[in-house]
Amino acid sequence: MSQHPARAAVFSAGSWGTAAAKILADAGTTVTVHARRTEIANAINIHHRNPGYFPDVRLPAALKATTDPAAALYGADFLVLSIPAQSLRTSLAAWAPHIGPGTVIVSLMKGIERDSGKRASEVIAEVTGVHTDRIAVLSGPNLAREIMAGQPAAATVACPDDNTARRFQTACHTAYFRPYTSTDVIGCELGGAVKNVIALATGIAHGMGLGHNAAAVLITRGLTETTRLATALGADPVTLAGLSGLGDLVATCTSPLSRNRTFGTYLGQGMSVAQVTAATQTTTEGVKSAEAILELARAHGVDMPITETIAALLHDKISLDRAMAALLERPTKPER
């Protein structure tokens, strides 16, 4: 084991990437952020701020940034990926030649690749050829704005190799951020991906003024269908009751800071998908992944009524009123 402080390269300088970089730096890890735009890298290096996302928050002085992927990855113990799930394959293929032979790749992504139905860790393994023991996932109720304010949060670090998970746990453990470890990568990733779709549903209910009871129904039944899919793919159901399952689901479905809930709220107020996309101008993984998650469920014979309804609504196959009726007027049957 090397004696120098752990080194992490964080790709890229978006909202969650910036928050993750701050956590790592606060934990004593040496951090270099890869930014696509020179002005963002310069602002981080000179002014210790990211004007694109958190202009009001001062970043740790030791946190550096560059637009050069090779420079960011030089000597990195960890490559931390926080980019849109749908651009992962193409972006990672360009960066792969610069990844060191011992670098652990950590995914912060919460989406399913549309064309393949693959989880981020599967895409990472396919593109890089890195063994799964060097691929980890960080997932939990982690609203970036709260983390940037130093408010308490926790997450799960999942990797098939427990030692790898514990190494990254140490690299990102701070007074305000508590990471737990797991070997259930499938459960962590599916909890993080499906909760975005359920958050769209609770956002729609909020936008239509349907109240907290309706939101609680959607969260509870959403957890049920998430667990059904995850366990069909080999996950431990206990994982879905933890931070990367229920924890992330509650935060994303109830907070106005959640992109997916906000997107759903606008839909519930009568805006079209195109109008909300133009208005928000942020990556909303639930919108991108809903269809892929539904296809994955169908391939494994799993019933996911909320996901099915949201996918239909996003593709103009069902009206807003009909969608909400479908979500809340399911046939009565035993709960278990």
Image (spheres, rainbow, N blue to C red):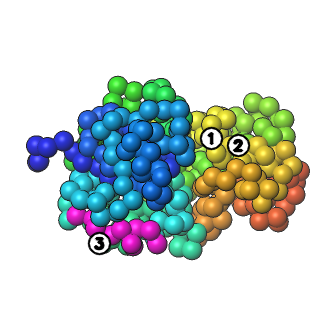
At numbered mark 2, what does the secondary structure look like: helix, strand or loop?
Answer: helix
Which of the two labelled residues, at mark 3 and mark 1, occupies the earlier sequence position?
A: 3
Visible residue check, residue 274: yes
Residue 63's place in the image compared with 164, above or below, is above
Q: Amino acid at mark 1?
A: Ser
Residue marked by disc 3? 97
Residue 258's place in the image compared with 311, above or below, is above
> At 67% from the left edge and 53% from the top edge, which residue is drawn?
281
Which of the two labelled residues, at mark 3 and mark 2, occupies the earlier sequence position?
A: 3
**Given contact means CB atoms under 8 Å apart, are the residues at marks 3 and 2 in contact?**
no
Q: Amino acid at mark 3?
A: Pro
Q: In this rendering, would 282 be left or right of 103?
A: right
In the foreground, 113 or 296: 113
At numbered mark 3, what does the secondary structure look like: helix, strand or loop?
Answer: helix
Task: Name the front one of labels 3 and 2.
Answer: 3
**Given contact means CB atoms under 8 Å apart, are the residues at marks 2 and 1 in contact?**
yes
Badge 3 crowding class, 10 Å Cα cut-off, few under 14, some 14 to 19, many 20 or more, is: few
> At 59% from the left edge and 47% from the top edge, which residue is drawn?
195
Residue 258's disc is 1
Q: In this rendering, would 105 be left or right of 302?
A: left
Residue marked by disc 2? 262
Badge 2 crowding class, 10 Å Cα cut-off, few under 14, some 14 to 19, many 20 or more, is: many
> At 23% from the left edge and 53% from the top edge, which residue is drawn?
77
Task: State the image coordinates of residue 6 (x, y, percent, origin top left).
Answer: 22, 45
Image label count: 3
Task: Name the front one of labels 3 and 1.
Answer: 3
Badge 1 crowding class, 10 Å Cα cut-off, few under 14, some 14 to 19, many 20 or more, is: many
Task: Examine the residues drawn in magenta and state their main secondary structure.
Answer: helix
At numbered mark 1, what does the secondary structure look like: helix, strand or loop?
Answer: loop
Task: State the image coordinates of residue 54 (x, y, percent, origin top left).
Answer: 53, 38
**Given contact means CB atoms under 8 Å apart, are the residues at marks 3 and 1 in contact?**
no
Q: Which residues are magenta?
A: 90-100
